[in-house]
Amino acid sequence: MGPNDSAGVEREIAELRARVSRLETTLASRGILLDEAQAAQAAATREIPATPATERVATAPGATGASTSPVAPRFASVEAELPGDERSLESRIGSQWFNRIGILAILIAAAWFLKLAIDNHWVGPLGRVLIGLLAGAGLIAWSERFRTHGYRAFSYSLKAVGSGVLYLSLWAAFSLYHLIGSPVAFTAMVAVTAFNAFLAWQQDAELLALYAIVGGFSTPLLIATGENHEIALFSYLLLLDLAVLTLVALKPWSRLLCGALAGTIFFFLEWSFEFYTKDQFGTTAFFLACFFLVFAFAPRLVRLRSGDEDALSGWDYLALTIAPLVNAGLGFLGYYVLLDSAGSAEAQPWVAVAFAAFYLSLLRLPTRGRRTPALTALHLTIAVVFLTIAIPLKAHGRWLTIGWLAEGGALLWQAARTEVKLLRVLGALCLLLGLGALVLVNPPAGMTPIFNARFGTYLVGIGIFALVAWLAARAKPKSEGFPAFFPALSWPALAGVSVVLVNALILLAVGWEIHSFWWYLSWRGDWHLMHSYMMDAQFTYSAFFMLFGAALLGIGFWRKSAFLRWQALVLLAAAIGKVFTVDLSELSQGYRILSFLGLGALLLAVSFAYQKDWLNLRNAEKKTA
C-alpha cells in the first residue's frame, strides 16, 4: 500500500468517525438507547471493550472498521446528561413538567386512597399503615433498577413518590390512627430524611437532596400536635440547617441553602406568631442567634455551581447575595421585636451596632475561591447600613445629624485610602442623610448668638464637607470607574460639590444667626420697634452677602480658581438682586444709601480687578480660541 492509499484510508476513517459521532448525537437527542446485545455487538464490531449498562453508548449499527478507535461519548440518559437549556420545549414539557405533575398526582391519589380505605373500612388501621410503608419502600427499591439502567431522572421521581408515601403513612399512623407516639413518628421521619440525604450524597444527586430537605421541613408539620415545643422544634431545625450547610460546603448545591433559609424563616415566624411570650425571651434569642450565624457564615463556605466565580448562576447569586441580605435584615428585625416586646427598647441601637461589628469582623475571615471582593462589598454594605440605622435609634436632634455626617466623612476618608468604590457610595449616602437632617430637621437656636448648639452643628457640617473636599482633591485613583455610570461620585465631582456645600452652609449658618439675633431683640417690643429690627436684619443680610462674596472672590484670585470666582459672582448677583428689590422697598433711607453705596463700591472694585486682568485671562482666552 502506497502513501496515497494510506492517506486515503485515514481520510475515510476520519469521515466515518465524524458520521458515527453525528449519529450518536442524533440518537441521544431523541432518547434512543441500545440494549445489552446491541451494545456488545457494536463494541465488538468497533473493537472496543463492552461497557456496562450504566455507561451505554449509542453506536451506528453499520459502523465497522478494523482499526477504529472509540469516539462515542458516554451518556446515561437524555434526561440526566443534556442541560436544560439545550432541550427543546417539547422535551422539557415531556421529561420535566409532566414528570413533576405525575409525582404530585400519585401523591394525591395515595392520599385519597388512604381516605377511601378509611371510609369503607377495607383494611384495618395497622394494615393501611403497613401497606403504605411497604409501598413506599418498594418504590424506592424499584427506582434503583431504573437508575442502574440509565434512567436517573425517572428513578429520582420514583424515589420522591416513595418518600412521600412513607411520610404520609407515618403521619397516618401518628395523627389519624394513633398507633405510634410523636417521638416514634418523628424518629421514623428523620430516618427517611437521612436515608434520602445519604442516597443524594452517594449518587451525587442534588435532586435527591432537595427531596430530603423538603421531607425534613415537612416533618414538624406532619407530627404537629398544636402544643408549644420550642426547644425540640428549633433544635431539630438547627440540626437540619447544619446538615444543609455541610452539604453545600462539599457539593455545588447552593439551592439547598436557599430552601433551608426559607423553611427556617417560615417555622420561626409561624411559631412566634402562635406561641411566643416574654417568658421565652432568652431561649428564643439564643436560637435566633444560632440560625443567624449559620446563614451568615454560609456564603463563605458554599461551593458554587458554576466554575466561573465571576459569572454566577441564578442559585449561586441567590446564595451569595440575596440570602445573606435577607438573613441580616430578618435577624436584626427579630431582635428588634424581641427587645421591644420585653420593654428593652434602649438596647435596640446597640443591637444594630453589634450587627455592624459582626459584619465588619467577617471582612477578616478567609473565603473560598475568588469571591473575596464580592463578599467584602456585601458585608461592608450591611455593616454601614446597620451603623446608619443605629444612629437614629440612639441619637436624637443634633446628635443624629452629627452622627450621619461623621459616618459619611469617615467612610469617604477610608475610601480615599483604600479606593473601594462602594465605600464612596455609602459615604455619599450618609453625608446626604446628614445634610438633609442639618437643613430640614435641625431645631432652632438658643438665645445666645453664635455660641449655641445649632451654629455648632453647622460648624461640624462645614468642617466635614471641607475635609471631604480636601480628601477628594488629593485623591489620585488608579482607575476612576465612576464616570461611566455615575459621574457625581468621581473624586473631582465630590470635591466640587463639597466646596459648594461648604460655602452654602456658611451662608445658611450665618443667615440663621442674623435672623435669630434680630428676632430675639424684636419679639418683645412694639410694632415700630419690631419694624426697625426687621430693617436692621435686612441690611445685615445684604452686608454679609456682599462681604462674603468679596472674600470668596479674593480667595479665587489668590488661588487662581475659576470655580471659586464663579461662586462669588453668583453670590454677588444675588446680592445685587436683593438690593434692587427688597432693600429698595423695605429699608429706610439711611439703610438704602448704605446698601447701594456698599454694593456700588464692591462692584467697582470687582470690575477694576477684572479690567486689570491680574490673572491674564485675556491671553488664556486667545490661546483657547
Image (cartoon, rainbow, N blue to C red):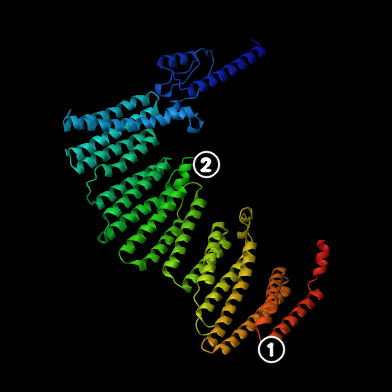
Image location (x, y in percent) of residue 482: 61, 55
Q: Residue at x 40, y 29 (%)?
A: 98
Q: Would residue 546 appear left or right of 400 to someone viewing this image?
A: right
CA gap, disc 2 to disc 1?
Answer: 78 Å
Image location (x, y in percent) of residue 154: 38, 28
- Element carrying mark 1: helix
- Element carrying mark 2: loop
Q: Which mark is residue 308?
A: 2
Q: Would residue 488 appear left or right of 156 to someone viewing this image?
A: right
Label 2 Cα crowd, 10 Å radius (few <14 / some 14-19 / many 20+): few
Q: Residue at x 59, y 84 (%)?
A: 534
Q: Which mark is residue 590?
A: 1
Callout 2, which amino acid?
Answer: Asp
Residue 414 in view, yes or no: no
Residue 482 or residue 168, whichever sits in front: 168
Which quadrant is home to the C terminus? bottom right
Q: Residue furthest top?
A: 1
Which quadrant is home to the N terminus? top right
Residue 350 or residue 512, whichever sits in front: 512
Height in image: 504 above or below 300? Answer: below
Height in image: 1 above or below 24? Answer: above
